[in-house]
Image: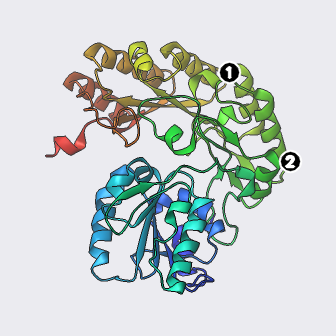
Amino acid sequence: MKSGDENTKNAPEKFSKTGLPIHFRYFRKNTYSYAALVPVLPNAAFSKKPENGIMLYSFFTNQKDDVFEEVDDARAELTNSFFIAGGPHPSGAPAETLEHFDAVVIGEGEETLPKLVFRISENEKNGVDRKTGFEEIAGIAFKNNSGDTFITPAGPAVELDKFPCFSPDSLWRPLEISRGCPHRCKFCQTPQLFGHKMRHRSVSEIVKYAAYYDDLRFISSNALAYGGNGVTPKSEKVKELLSGLSKLDGKRIYFGTFPSEVRPEFVTEEMIDLVGKYCANDSLSIGAQSGSDAVLTEIGRGHSAADVLNAAEICRRADIIPIVDFIIGFPNETLTDQEQTLEMIDWICRHGGEVRAHYLTPLPSTPYENIVPAKVHPEISKKLGKLALGGKLKGNWEDMKNKSA
């Protein structure tokens, strides 16, 4: 797999066909987004600092303060730059982002970003205001010269087969096989970014790009939902994909592992048999989020605590390690809820599984955007710490920002 560092050393030609330089601001953590965008802007370069021209940023909520500070500082020196933001945080908080950026691409960028870049470049070439015609571009936010904010209507959902997973000549990243999610978890941005309908890349397209790798890893909101609507498992579709990939010589398939995960109710004997037959992974990443049925119902998760235990047990019988994600700090989460989550975490660890624990981060554009996360009870935190010392639990389940204040 090619690294981003190699790409910054061997960047494509600096200038676009219209003459205005275009730069992706490179951070190691945002390269998954860029992998899909590099093919539609083949003349853009990677940069580890702001440059004159069109600067493209993609970032998460936990990166926003550093990014905003960098862009504000850069404006004082780079007077000929135009700053465009996209990705999870800008898409969820376009108004906030426009306090620092000139435009925001909301949601998917394959169709929108090239149109926006071309419009800016053409306006520059013709000597008119750079934001002329922005209102004609779907799925963006911008401020006019009077300071008024405009958000244009979203365009149609991207057809994944129309666009490459990545550019073979540039940035290689895991194969994105699906987008969207039909579930409405209150903490999650995925449906806001990519919609509530799952879309899938075809097996033939996935196999084509898989040829570039030895180890195959995938991106999906739920890998075991491939080919279906995200509510009902379609094992025949998963089998079609995995069997197609298995025909490539010398490939090791890692399915349902990071950076993807699976929902627990999709972990069935049939699905695990497929993983065992076609895949190289000895673990499965499972999103549980809570051990409390009351919390699971409140957050709109769409599965029960029993589904999580059942998934872990199916994995255990197949000698596959369940690596289970939990979030602590949901609003109105009681001590009883946290004790039930701890009990499930302890059970998973005692039965050969592993756990990743996280403290809730309220994300923009989600129903929990403005909530105050519940505090983790000291006894719960202490017991989680003991499990972490045993090597079975990883992550950060405390409110570190307020704890260090």
Residue extending furthest front?
146
Q: Amino acid at mark 2?
A: Lys
Q: Amino acid at mark 1?
A: Thr
* Quadrant (top left/top right/bottom left/bottom right) for the N terminus: bottom right
Residue under label 1, please give it.
268
Residue extending furthest right?
247
Q: Is residue 109 above or below residue 273?
A: below
Rendered location of residue 116, percent (x, y): 54, 67
Q: Residue at horizontal 68%, vertical 30%?
A: 229
Q: Residue at horizontal 44%, vertical 66%?
A: 84
Rendered location of residue 100, percent (x, y): 32, 64
Rendered location of residue 106, percent (x, y): 49, 53
Q: Quadrant of residue 199?
A: top right
Q: Quadrant of residue 110?
A: bottom right
Q: CA distance from mark 1 to mark 2?
A: 24 Å
Tag shown at residue 321: none
**Residue 223 appears in the rendering:** yes
**Residue 291 appears in the rendering:** no
Residue under label 2, please give it.
247
Q: Nearer the viewer, residue 19 or 178?
A: 19
The local crowd at label 1, few if under 14, some if 14 to 19, many if 20 or more residues have their Cα within 10 Å, is: some
N-terminal of the pair, mark 1 or mark 2, is 2
The local crowd at label 2, few if under 14, some if 14 to 19, many if 20 or more residues have their Cα within 10 Å, is: few
Q: Label 1's element?
A: loop
**Left or right, residue 18 beside residue 271:** left
Q: Nearer the viewer, residue 347 or 364?
A: 364
**Left or right, residue 171 beside residue 50:** right
Q: Residue at horizontal 27%, vertical 79%?
A: 76
